[in-house]
């Protein structure tokens, strides 16, 4: 994701969150609308539904990428799941997340650490920075994986070229 675009989206969402009405009945920033706004991934509904909703619409996988959304499963203490955008990949098993409604209700956190603690290294078990502790939280949360901002590819490249009316034969050369 373009860093300037991310910065602009983050500033806009943060400003909107600060200008929200203050009465007791007023809403607060939830993780799903925030993740949708900063990532550009157009999925709606509770966070635990994002992984299944992404199938066929967006590419999904187990490897972190900048701009992807990490989709957490519903769990005890987190019945609606959670979604957070990857703002930076530090390694195959460590990322920085930008998300809302994690350490404090409605709060927005930018570039907080999350690590993969799964045995398989597939991001199915994750620990996340928790501000009240000043470090990684003690709880391990279940996660489905990453939703990438790119569309899902459901057909082979040759089929896509044929649909587009491309003349001739599609050939593929190895990339060095």
Image (tube, rainbow, N blue to C red):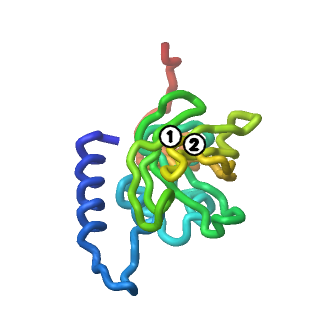
- Residue at image position (24%, 54%) is 11
Q: Earlier in the sequence, mark 1 or mark 2?
A: 1
The numbered disc on residue 113 is 1
- Residue at image position (50%, 58%) is 102
Tell me residue 172's x, y (percent). Answer: 51, 25
- Residue at image position (65%, 51%) is 143
Tell me residue 131's x, y (percent). Answer: 48, 50
Q: Which dot, 1 or 2, sits closer to the camera?
A: 2
The numbered disc on residue 136 is 2
Q: Is residue 79 above or below residue 128?
A: below
- Distance Cα–Cα, label 1 vs label 2: 7 Å
Tell me residue 174's x, y (percent). Answer: 52, 18
Can residue 158 be seen in the rendering of this structure?
no
Can residue 173 be seen in the rendering of this structure?
yes
Q: Secondary structure at mark 2?
A: strand
Query: In which quadrant of the rendered view does residue 76 lie?
Result: bottom right
Tell me residue 8's x, y (percent). Answer: 23, 51
Assess disc 1: are there few (<14), some (14-19) or many (≥20) residues with their C-alpha within 10 Å of its C-alpha. many
Pick out the residue farthest to the top: 176
- Residue at image position (66%, 59%) is 73
Q: Secondary structure at mark 1?
A: strand
Is there a contact, CB below 8 Å, between mark 1 and mark 2? yes
Instruction: Judge left or right: residue 37 versus residue 55.
Output: left
Assess disc 2: are there few (<14), some (14-19) or many (≥20) residues with their C-alpha within 10 Å of its C-alpha. some
Q: Is residue 148 above or below residue 118?
A: below
Pick out the residue farthest to the right: 119
Of the pair 149 and 164, the residue shown nearer to us: 149
Of the pair 49 and 102, the residue shown nearer to us: 102
Of the pair 175 and 112, the residue shown nearer to us: 112
In which quadrant will I find the N terminus? top left
């Amino acid at each position: 994701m373009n860093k300037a675009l991310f910065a602009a989206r983050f500033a806009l969402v943060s400003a909107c969150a600060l200008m929200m009405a203050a009465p007791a009945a007023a809403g607060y920033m939830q993780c799903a609308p925030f993740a949708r706004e900063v990532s550009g991934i157009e999925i709606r509904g509770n966070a635990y539904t994002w992984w299944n909703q992404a199938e066929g619409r967006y590419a999904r996988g187990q490897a972190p990428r900048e701009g992807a959304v990490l989709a957490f499963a519903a769990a005890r203490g987190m019945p609606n799941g959670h979604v957070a955008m990857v703002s930076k990949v530090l390694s195959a098993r460590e990322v920085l997340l930008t998300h809302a409604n994690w350490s404090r209700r409605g709060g927005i956190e930018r570039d907080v650490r999350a690590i993969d603690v799964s045995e398989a290294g597939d991001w199915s078990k994750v620990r996340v920075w928790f501000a009240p502790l000043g470090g990684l939280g003690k709880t391990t949360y279940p996660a489905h994986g990453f939703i990438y901002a790119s569309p899902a590819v459901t057909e082979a490249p040759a089929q896509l070229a044929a649909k587009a009316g491309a003349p001739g034969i599609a050939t593929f050369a190895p990339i060095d």
